Image (cartoon, rainbow, N blue to C red):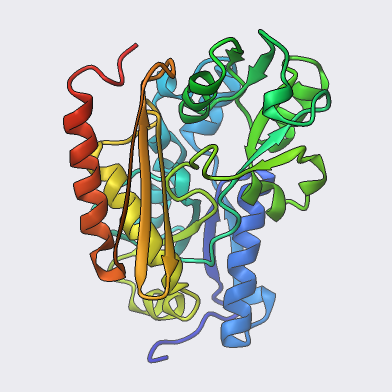
């Protein structure tokens, strides 16, 4: 290290949203930095920032996220705090991150990726296939909604937004007979006991970057850049480079049902991607293998190919 490490008198400020999962991710980041540099907990300060998305989500709890502004609503205030110097780094769930960062900010540190799978959660049935005709299933994800309807067009899929605890409470209250959550989030919260069944990517391709934590910083902060490189997980970065290039070329957002997953095997990368009509009536897929270094270009080319197949209006109901 060529720059001064944080101290209890001048702690590194870690910005995060205030949900239990967001805090768990911030604590994991802090723990990894503490271990990497043999620093005490007091050398870090967790700064909870309430975002526009958090406020609007409470007010508009039953409206789809796309109708209240999409992913950027959950990062805007955090990124503004970083640009103003109120925090030094920000910890994000990568599946919730827009593909472009504001000027002056960099996202080039990823922690080791957790389980990428979706979890089927139901107190009533043991598997998706066991759901009765017309069963009510709750999800806030357009991807999961479209994937469900592609397999089971008979299901009644309803809006089911909120953090993990809120969604589990809705399930308990009978708002729906089943829902889907990310295995990664449940693992980080120590709540895997609620999982009825983990769904393999072959059956439900996860969201781009699902299970990955990213740490954002100011581009000119060399001290932080050096610190974060010590905890950066290179294989996760290689996988996300391909997945996020795929998403970026599709102009992916909360308004488009898209799944994508890159996996490494030796020096090769396999990328699977799919796009779906919102009602699940059509699914377009691709699957490529390439050198790891070519992952981002493979993601971009896959997206261009699927867009060409889809034509205009594919994502419009």
Image mark count: 0
**241 relative to 45 in the view: left or right:** left
| Residue 126 visible somewhere in the drawing | yes
Residue 314: image location, x then y, percent: 27, 20
Residue shown at the point (68%, 9%) measured from the top left: 133
Viewer-closest of 279 and 25: 279
| Residue 8 visible somewhere in the drawing | no
Residue 198: image location, x then y, percent: 68, 43
Residue 132 position by quadrant: top right
Depicted 160 relative to depicted 114: above or below: above
Residue 122 position by quadrant: top right
Q: What quarter of the picture does the C terminus occupy?
A: top left
**13 relative to 40 in the view: left or right:** left
Viewer-closest of 125 and 145: 125
Q: What quarter of the picture does the N terminus occupy?
A: bottom left
What is the residue that sits farthest to the bottom in this orientation? 2
Residue 274: image location, x then y, percent: 37, 37
Viewer-closest of 84 and 52: 52
Residue shown at the point (38%, 91%) measured from the top left: 2
**78 relative to 249 in the view: left or right:** right
Depicted 72 relative to depicted 6: above or below: above
Residue shown at the point (24%, 35%) measured from the top left: 306
């Amino acid at each position: 290290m060529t720059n001064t490490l944080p101290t209890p008198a001048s702690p590194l400020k870690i910005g995060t949203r205030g949900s239990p999962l967001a805090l768990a991710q911030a604590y994991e980041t802090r723990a990894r930095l503490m271990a990497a540099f043999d620093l005490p907990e007091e050398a870090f300060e967790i700064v909870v920032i309430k975002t526009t998305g958090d406020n609007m989500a409470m007010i508009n709890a039953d409206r789809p996220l796309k109708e209240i502004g999409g992913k950027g609503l959950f990062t805007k205030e955090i990124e503004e705090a970083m640009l103003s110097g109120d925090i030094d780094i920000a910890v994000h769930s990568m599946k919730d991150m827009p593909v472009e960062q504001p000027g002056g900010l960099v996202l080039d540190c990823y922690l080791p990726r957790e389980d990428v799978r979706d979890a089927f959660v139901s107190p009533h049935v043991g598997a998706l296939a066991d759901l009765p005709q017309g069963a009510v299933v709750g999800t806030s994800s357009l991807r999961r909604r479209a994937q469900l309807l592609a397999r089971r067009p008979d299901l009644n899929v309803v809006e089911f937004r909120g953090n993990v605890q809120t969604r589990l409470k809705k399930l308990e209250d009978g708002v729906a007979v089943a829902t889907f959550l990310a295995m990664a989030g449940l693992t980080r919260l120590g709540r895997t006991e609620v999982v009825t069944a983990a769904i393999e990517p072959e059956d439900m391709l996860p969201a781009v970057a699902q299970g990955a934590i990213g740490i954002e910083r100011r581009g000119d902060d060399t001290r932080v850049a050096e610190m974060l490189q010590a905890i950066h997980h290179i294989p996760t970065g290689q996988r996300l480079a391909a997945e996020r290039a795929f998403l970026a070329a599709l102009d992916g957002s909360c308004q488009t049902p898209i799944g994508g997953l890159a996996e490494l095997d030796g020096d090769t990368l396999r990328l699977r991607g799919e796009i779906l009509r919102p009602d699940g009536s059509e699914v377009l897929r691709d699957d490529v293998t390439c050198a790891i270094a070519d992952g981002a270009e493979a993601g971009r080319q896959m997206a261009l190919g699927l867009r060409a197949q889809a034509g205009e209006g594919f994502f419009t109901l």
